[in-house]
Image (cartoon, helix red, strand yellow):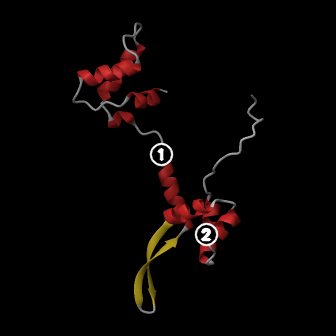
Amino acid sequence: MSEINYNTKKQYTQLSLVEHTKIETLLNEKKSIRYIAERLGRNVSTIYREIKRGSVNQMVHRNGIQRDELKYYAETSHHIYKAKQQNKYHHDLTEKFSQQFFKDLQQAVTETYRIHSIDTFVHWYRLNHPNEKVPCTKTVYTFVH
């Protein structure tokens, strides 16, 4: 099947900084979440979650009374999104787990006559080195590929 001939619609796209800014502007104009969702062509739940994630507590003085108020800021929300996106991928497994395990795994996999598959090697290593922190088989397969 050709990649340009498809009939499925893309499910979801992340909110852009422009959309974050529109949300902030419409909230400052006291528009409802439903109205904002219709204007942006998004689901009401998406807008609600975005407002919840991007809101910060701010001290407000009104009539001589000081209190906390949740306020949505587009730049703060977008910054939080970018920070979470950066931390999402490619963690260095060699720092979390035994470095000796990865050295032995590389040696075992590159041998001419392999005794172990990756799965059996993980289990064998766990049995023979109970004090070392060893990743699960799925994590090793993800790391290898």
Indicate which disc, 2 or 1, sits on the residue closer to the N terminus: 2
Q: In the drawing, does residue 120 fall left or right of residue 70?
A: left
Height in image: 109 above or below 73? above
The picture quadrant where one finds residue 105 is top left
Q: In the drawing, does residue 131 fall left or right of residue 46?
A: left
Extreme residue in the left direction:
131
Residue at coordinates 48% horizontally, 52% vertically from top-left?
84
Height in image: 40 above or below 85? below
Q: Which label sits in the foreground, 2 or 1?
A: 2
Q: Circle 1 sits in a helix, a strand or a loop, which is it?
A: loop
The reply to whether dot 2 and dot 1 touch (C-beta < 8 Å) is: no
Height in image: 59 above or below 124? below
Residue at coordinates 34% horizontally, 36% vertically from top-left?
95
Residue at coordinates 49% horizontally, 48% vertically from top-left?
86
Q: Circle 2 sits in a helix, a strand or a loop, which is it?
A: helix
Residue 69 lies, in percent from the top left, at 46, 77
Q: Which mark is residue 33?
A: 2
The picture quadrant where one finds residue 58 is bottom left
Quadrant where the N terminus lies? top right
The picture quadrant where one finds residue 96 is top left
Residue 73 lies, in percent from the top left, at 54, 69
- Is 111 or 24 nearer to us in this picture? 24
Q: Residues within 10 Å of mark 1 (few under 14, many from 20)?
A: few
Judging by the rendered image, the residue that carries numbered circle 1 is 88
Q: In the drawing, does residue 128 fall left or right of residue 77?
A: left
Height in image: 29 above or below 134? below
Extreme residue in the right direction:
5
Q: Amino acid at mark 2?
A: Ile
Q: CA distance from mark 2 to mark 1?
A: 29 Å
